[in-house]
Image (cartoon, rainbow, N blue to C red):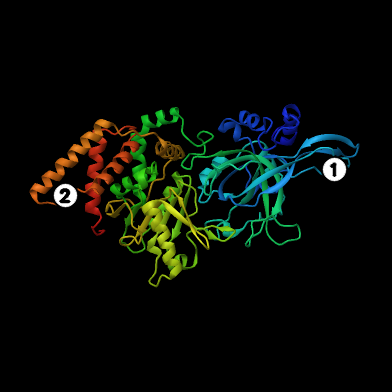
């Protein structure tokens, strides 16, 4: 017997072995969690479990073990009371048994509740509406494709299959194909929240009809509404939102990953800057800033400040420039999650960038997992007027850029959620959105028309480099902090004496932020003098390039 093909048999064995009569159903999982954690404790072992998606749902057997990598779109579905265990009579011989139903839809077709039911225990289930990870790059989807059983099942796929049903307004990107499932769990995990990226290991259940109107409730069979597949969760692994799909179970790099990338960082860095430069018309300075942008993440929020964010605006005044499309191709080839949004008047005025709703939480284009890069193309904007909806959308983007927060709008109040979204903005002039850094592109006149593509091996190294160093532990040494503070005070004194412009605390904050990213990009996990000087040089060039005109 394979635990992947028949997980309920394994669960029943554990139930018979470990369940104690009179135990509390909401506190005792009779060893199921531990058993499956031990069975699938590495990424290699997890990859053997079939991935649940819009294609595999047509072939995967009911009650088989599946893996579903997803974003939690809504945590507020109605709780339901369900059978935890009961005495059933097995057909056709009528043999009775005390059976656990926690990770299933209830008694099987060949089982019926015993007429003299002497023990029936109930369970309280919580449900999450989950969707396929928004903006997931194709190379990540390919890496997640399991071998073995799922490959065999895909070969049995029928020629005519029904498209998986979803609730369109519960996915952030309008008209983008995706997959959705209701994840059911017997305990409410307070650590799981909206936009969290999770990997669910569970038993595939029957599809439920879920309301697409104003109610969260699961509907009667006769009611209208899309049928959404269900997964009875055994394990819910919270995946680090910046992680590479082939790293550890939780997406974080190991010390071994970090050590190897630190060793090769400078070589990879140079190659990656050359690759990005091709997308920004040969401008290596802009390419370096894009690289630093790819490594940025919010790592702390002391006293309301947001440390680590680095929104970037590239200004390109050339008509019909290919920069936006070229950059989209590049970042999608190296980052796990990317989505391009044309900032047209129609997009701003007619769509929603923020989540909203009454009882049902409808999504918005900014309801994405942490670590997602949104490429905003303002060069697509036409002349016209922003209506009230467009102004609200623009404010939502501004809040993400300045504060990394997003308001969820409800009829009587707004709830503010923290985000960590990378904003890369392409525009003709200064962006409509305030950013941490904005420069004008300076094309390289001698740039060859024919661009060279990186090898698959190079792409793999770029992806691991970004994912691992983005999450690496960085230390700001006390000695360097004192040295930087001393220099800052000396520069202000000298500028005051000369009657020139004083360096501001904001300038210092930008330099410190740049220094962290420069150090990480070079594989340095502690700031040194070389990286600090390089960051200060970059800061000066940013000031010069922020007001120049493209050639």
Query: In the rendered view, would you say 428 is above or below 288?
Result: below
Q: Closer to the camera, 237 or 87?
A: 87
Q: How many marks?
A: 2
Q: List the single residue furthest toward the left.
A: 498
- Residue 214 lies in quadrant: bottom right
| Label 2 – label 1 distance at C-alpha | 81 Å
Give the side of residue 41 with respect to residue 59, left or right.
left
Q: Mark 2 near mark 1, Cβ–Cβ under 8 Å?
A: no
Residue 183: image x %, image y %?
A: 64, 46
- Residue 29 lies in quadrant: top right
Residue 190: image x %, image y %?
A: 56, 43
Residue 355: image x %, image y %?
A: 51, 58
Q: Closer to the camera, 277 or 31?
A: 31
Label 1 crowd (10 A; few <14 / some 14-19 / many >=20) = some
Q: Residue at x 43, y 52 (%)?
A: 405
- For the N terminus, the quadrant is top right
Kindly identify which numbered label has been placed on residue 502. 2
Kindly identify which numbered label has been placed on residue 537. none
Dot placed on the residue nearer the N-terminal end, 2 or 1: 1
Kindly identify which numbered label has been placed on residue 112. 1
Q: Residue at x 70, y 52 (%)?
A: 208
Determine the secondary structure under disc 1: strand
Q: List the single residue furthest toward the right.
A: 93
Label 2 crowd (10 A; few <14 / some 14-19 / many >=20) = some
């Amino acid at each position: 017997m394979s635990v992947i093909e028949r997980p309920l048999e394994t669960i029943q064995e554990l139930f018979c072995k470990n369940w104690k009569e009179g135990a509390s159903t909401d506190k005792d999982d009779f060893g199921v969690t531990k058993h499956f954690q031990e069975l699938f404790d590495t990424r290699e072992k997890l990859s053997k479990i079939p991935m649940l998606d819009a294609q595999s749902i047509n072939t995967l057997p009911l009650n088989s073990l599946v893996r579903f990598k997803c974003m939690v779109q809504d945590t507020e579905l109605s709780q339901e009371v369900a059978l935890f265990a009961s005495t059933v009579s097995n057909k056709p011989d009528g043999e009775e048994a005390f059976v656990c139903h926690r990770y299933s839809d209830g008694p099987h077709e060949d089982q019926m509740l015993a007429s003299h039911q002497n023990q029936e225990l109930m369970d309280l289930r919580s449900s999450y509406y989950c969707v396929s990870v928004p903006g997931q790059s194709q190379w990540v989807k390919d890496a997640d494709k399991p071998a073995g059983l799922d490959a065999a099942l895909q070969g049995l796929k029928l020629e005519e299959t029904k498209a998986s049903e979803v609730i369109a307004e519960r996915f952030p990107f309008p008209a983008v194909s995706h997959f959705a499932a209701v994840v059911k769990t017997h305990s409410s995990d307070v650590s799981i929240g909206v936009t969290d990226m999770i990997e669910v290991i569970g038993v595939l259940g029957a599809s439920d009809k879920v309301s697409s109107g104003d109610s969260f409730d699961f509907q009667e069979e006769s009611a209208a509404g899309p049928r959404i597949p269900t997964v009875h969760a055994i394990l819910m692994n919270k995946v680090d939102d910046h992680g590479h799909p082939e790293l550890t179970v939780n997406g974080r790099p190991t010390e071994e990953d970090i050590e190897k990338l630190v060793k090769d960082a400078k070589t990879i860095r140079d190659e990656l800057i050359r690759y990005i430069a091709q997308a920004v018309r040969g401008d290596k300075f802009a390419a370096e800033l894009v690289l630093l942008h790819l490594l940025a993440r919010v790592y702390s929020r002391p006293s309301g400040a947001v440390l680590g964010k680095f929104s970037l605006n590239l200004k390109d005044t050339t008509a019909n420039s290919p920069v936006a499309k070229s950059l989209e191709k590049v970042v999608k080839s190296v980052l796990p999650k990317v989505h391009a949004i044309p900032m047209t008047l129609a997009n701003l005025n007619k769509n929603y960038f923020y989540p909203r709703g009454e009882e049902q939480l409808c999504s918005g284009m900014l309801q994405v997992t942490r670590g997602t890069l949104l490429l905003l193309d303002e060069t697509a904007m036409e002349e016209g007027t922003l209506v009230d909806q467009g102004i609200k959308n623009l404010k939502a983007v501004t809040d993400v850029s300045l504060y990394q927060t997003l308001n969820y709008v409800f009829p009587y109040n707004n709830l503010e959620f923290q985000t960590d979204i990378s904003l890369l903005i392409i525009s003709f002039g200064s962006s409509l959105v305030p950013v941490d850094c904005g420069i004008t592109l300076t094309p390289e006149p001698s740039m060859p028309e024919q661009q060279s593509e990186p090898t698959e091996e190079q792409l793999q190294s770029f992806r691991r480099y970004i994912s691992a160093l983005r999450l690496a532990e960085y230390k700001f040494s006390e000695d360097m902090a004192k040295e930087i503070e001393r220099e800052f005070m000396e520069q202000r004194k000298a500028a005051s004496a000369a009657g020139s412009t004083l360096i501001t605390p904001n300038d210092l904050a930008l330099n410190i932020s740049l220094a962290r990213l420069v150090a990480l990009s070079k594989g340095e996990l502690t700031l040194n003098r070389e990286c600090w000087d390089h960051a200060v040089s970059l800061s000066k060039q940013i000031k010069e390039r922020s007001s120049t005109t493209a050639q």
